Amino acid sequence: MSTTDRTSQILTALRSGQGTELPALLTAAAKTHYPLSGVDILIVDYNMSAMVAAQGAAAPVPIDGTPEGRVFASQRTAQVESGDQTHRLICALTARGQRLGVLVVTFTDEPDEDVAGEWEIIAQHVAHEIVVVENITDRFRRTRRRRRLTLAAEIQWDTLPARSVATPDFAFAGQLEPAYEVCGDTFDWSTDPEGLTAAVINGYNQGTSAAVLTNFVVAALRNARRSGDDIAAQAALASDLLYTQHQGGQYVDALLLRYDTVTGRLTAVSTGSAQMIRLRGTAIATLDLPTQPALGLEEETDYTASAVPVKPGDRILVVSDGVYDAPNSANLQYRLTALGQVLRRTRLQPAGEAVRTIIRDVLDYRGSPLDDDAVVACLDLLPADSRTPSGG
């Protein structure tokens, strides 16, 4: 049987049964065509510290310090020989830049390059299938949580689009922390043929009331965006609707971004809470924007989008005050010095991994769990000579 035929038959098998049975369908089909002893789908958990098997009761696999974690971080396939003379092929599970986890295929004989290439293709399709079936089952969401989410965190994660996306022109990634208890902070994004629109939102209050307020704003921003409004008009509509609802008694801070891939222009609307930092080579610059009223604070507020000085190859980082102001045991805040160091250290990492590393660095700096919500978002403006098809 040709390579194309057996790959196609496995992909057909994935779609032949219920989405809830995806791991079993994959394993059964794979064993028909390859000399292997097992296939494991590992899903990254909410705080991106470990990956959990979608089937069975195996212990979570840490991302730091394991072959599986290195593949997740680098997005590069690896082979590992196990002590029992089996060979593990580890492939990234990624759908259009959305990092879901890894696929681990255990062979009885060492796979050659052709087989490895086939499984990279299969892994891409498995990732896409997971994204699709998450609309009809909670199986992978249950796998992803290593402990119970608070209701506020459930609201926030359920509203998020994917944590990351990659195109030939840009890559964008974000993360919420504390992942299992986040309540008031979030981010949102959407791509279109001309670029990316994104928002980082810093809500107030605590618990479910903060999550409900933030999600009201996300829905308002999406309503304006999907009606064709630019980011200034999006901010104005969200502010008006929130003011109408609460008469200025409830409001949120936000930073809205628009990256136009045709012109290469980046514009932003800021209400002052989030910090935007640019990494160009090894040079760090804080990008100061005119501060405008918080969304919902004043009646009928007009907002203005400001140009942000960027060029291809730049990395733009947006962090909420929960990151920037995070104190350590000596009550010294994280601020630009520590952030600049980790930014330089992660400059060669993909956007999604850079975000994960920065979150880990903030937690290490603090020495204890965060007591304030934190958002880290990263936008890479890809130079023409590094652009490749987004794949995955």
Image (cartoon, helix red, strand yellow):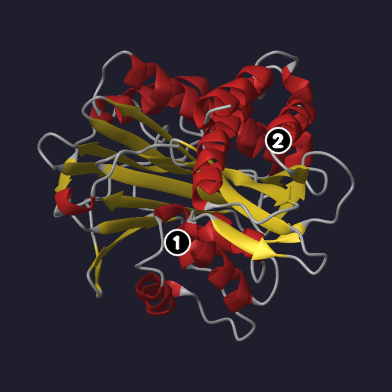
**Foreground of the two, 257 or 27:** 27
Q: Amino acid at mark 2?
A: Glu
Disc 1 from disc 2: Cα separation:
24 Å
The total number of labels drawn is 2
Where does the image place residue 111, in percent across and percent down from the top left? 61, 52
Q: Amino acid at mark 1?
A: Ala
Q: Residue furthest bottom?
A: 330
Where does the image place residue 291, in percent across and percent down from the top left? 27, 50
Q: Residue furthest right?
A: 57
**Foreground of the two, 96 or 319:** 96
Residue at 48% x, 29% y: name it.
Answer: 218
Check the picture and name the quadrant holding the N terminus: top right
| Nearest to viewer (mark 1 / mark 2) | 1
Where does the image place residue 220, in percent across and percent down from the top left? 44, 22
Task: State the SS at label 2.
Answer: helix
Residue 203 visible somewhere in the drawing:
no
N-terminal of the pair, mark 1 or mark 2, is 2
Residue placed under numbered mark 1 in the picture? 354
Relative to 367, is 53 on the left or the right? right
**Foreground of the two, 108 or 301:** 108
Q: Residue furthest front?
A: 1
**Foreground of the two, 274 or 81:** 81
- Crowd band around label 2 with a 10 angstrom C-alpha radius: few (<14), some (14–19), many (20+): some
Relative to 147, is 262 on the left or the right? left
In the rendered image of this protein, does residue 364 appear above or below residue 2? below
Relative to 152, is 115 on the left or the right? left
- Crowd band around label 1 with a 10 angstrom C-alpha radius: few (<14), some (14–19), many (20+): many
Check the picture and name the quadrant holding the C terminus: top left
Residue at 60% x, 60% y: name it.
Answer: 79
Residue 348 visible somewhere in the drawing:
yes
Where does the image place residue 271, in percent across and percent down from the top left? 34, 46
Residue placed under numbered mark 2 in the picture? 154
